[in-house]
Image: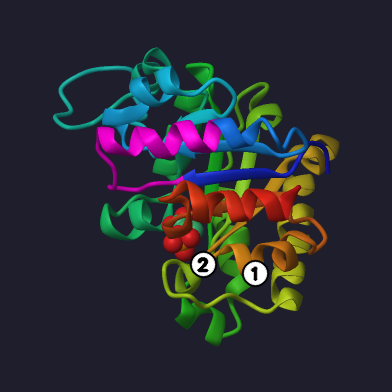
């Protein structure tokens, strides 16, 4: 697994211009942690200003439409994210999959559109609690990867996968390190099955209730190459606690 630990804040539907103070603080502090790659995915309304306010950190979208433009009221395309200053986009977050009914095929089309627009991609996968309780967690995640991994030429080089158990998102609950280890190993094996040797270089992030006080332990698990952080990314103080734990 290549690369620096990658710590990404997903602000979801949170943040107005006042949040740019947090961006500036995160960006200033990121300079003290050159061995950590730091990024935030603000709401689309703030991408341009976030890019403008930050010198070091990456800036991303939280979703994109699979097409470049057209009659899709309220949607935002990958070229629009790129034009606004994004370096990457998240696709397939469980909130998009469950609330917006996105299928694996939708997620794959979005990921391929993002690559075509020159964006890197963080592709989210993860099982529900019922699926884990039924002993199906790895089968579910493996199926999500089969259905949603982008296959466009060169895509694998700009791909990260985020394993986010749905039941751990925003709940304060995290899987045991053994469960994280087993799932990340299974994801790695699946990525190698899909992409061949190149699959060994895809960064696999963990997401779901990562905080400053559990980050070091989660990040020490084999094959955990970083964290996708929701709630704890909304203030510079809590987010930087996680960045510091990754350093
Ligand atoms: C997320 O939604 O991507 C996430 C990881 O949220 P939280 O950190 O709040 O659990």
Q: Nearer the viewer, residue 106 or 169?
A: 169
The residue lying at 18 percent from left, 28 percent from top is 72
Residue under label 2, please give it: 209
- Label 2: few (<14), some or many (≥20) within 10 Å? many
The residue lying at 63 percent from left, 27 percent from top is 155
Can residue 217 be seen by looking at this rendering?
Answer: yes
**Label 2 SS:** loop
Can residue 190 be seen by looking at this rendering?
Answer: no
In the image, which disc is placed on residue 214?
A: 1
Which quadrant, please, contains the N terminus? top right
Task: Tell whether position 122 is magenta.
Answer: no
> What is the x, y in percent for residue 64?
36, 32
Report the span colored magenta. 10-27
Q: Residue furthest bottom?
A: 133
Tell me if the residue at label 2 has its CB under 8 Å from ligand 1. Answer: yes
In this rendering, would 124 be left or right of 193? Answer: left
Q: Main secondary structure of the magenta part?
A: helix
Contact? badges 2 and 1 (CB < 8 Å): yes
- Label 1: few (<14), some or many (≥20) within 10 Å? few
Above or below for 47 versus 35? above
In the image, which disc is placed on residue 190?
A: none
**Label 1 SS:** helix
Above or below for 50 versus 8? above
């Amino acid at each position: 697994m290549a690369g620096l630990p990658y710590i990404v804040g997903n602000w979801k539907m949170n943040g107005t211009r006042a949040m740019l103070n947090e961006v500036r603080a995160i960006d200033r502090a990121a300079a003290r942690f050159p061995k950590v790659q730091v990024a935030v995915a603000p709401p689309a309304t703030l991408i341009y200003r976030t890019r403008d306010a930050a010198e070091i950190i990456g800036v991303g979208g939280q979703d994109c439409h699979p097409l470049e433009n057209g009659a899709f009221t309220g949607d935002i395309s990958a070229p629009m994210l790129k034009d606004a200053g994004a370096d990457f986009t998240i696709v397939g977050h469980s909130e998009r999959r469950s609330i917006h009914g996105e299928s694996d095929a939708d997620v794959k089309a979005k990921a391929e559109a993002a690559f075509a627009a020159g964006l890197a991609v963080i592709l989210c996968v993860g099982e529900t609690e019922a699926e884990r309780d039924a002993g199906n967690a790895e089968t579910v995640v493996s199926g999500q990867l089969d259905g949603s991994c982008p296959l466009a030429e060169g895509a694998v080089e700009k791909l990260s996968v985020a394993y986010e158990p749905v039941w751990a998102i925003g709940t304060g609950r995290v899987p045991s390190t053994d469960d994280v280890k087993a799932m990340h190993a299974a994801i790695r094996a699946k990525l190698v099955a899909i992409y061949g040797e190149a699959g060994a270089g895809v960064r696999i992030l963990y997401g779901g209730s990562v905080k400053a006080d559990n980050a070091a332990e989660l990040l020490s698990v084999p094959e955990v190459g970083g964290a996708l952080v929701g709630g704890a990314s909304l203030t510079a103080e809590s987010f930087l606690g996680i960045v510091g734990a990754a350093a």
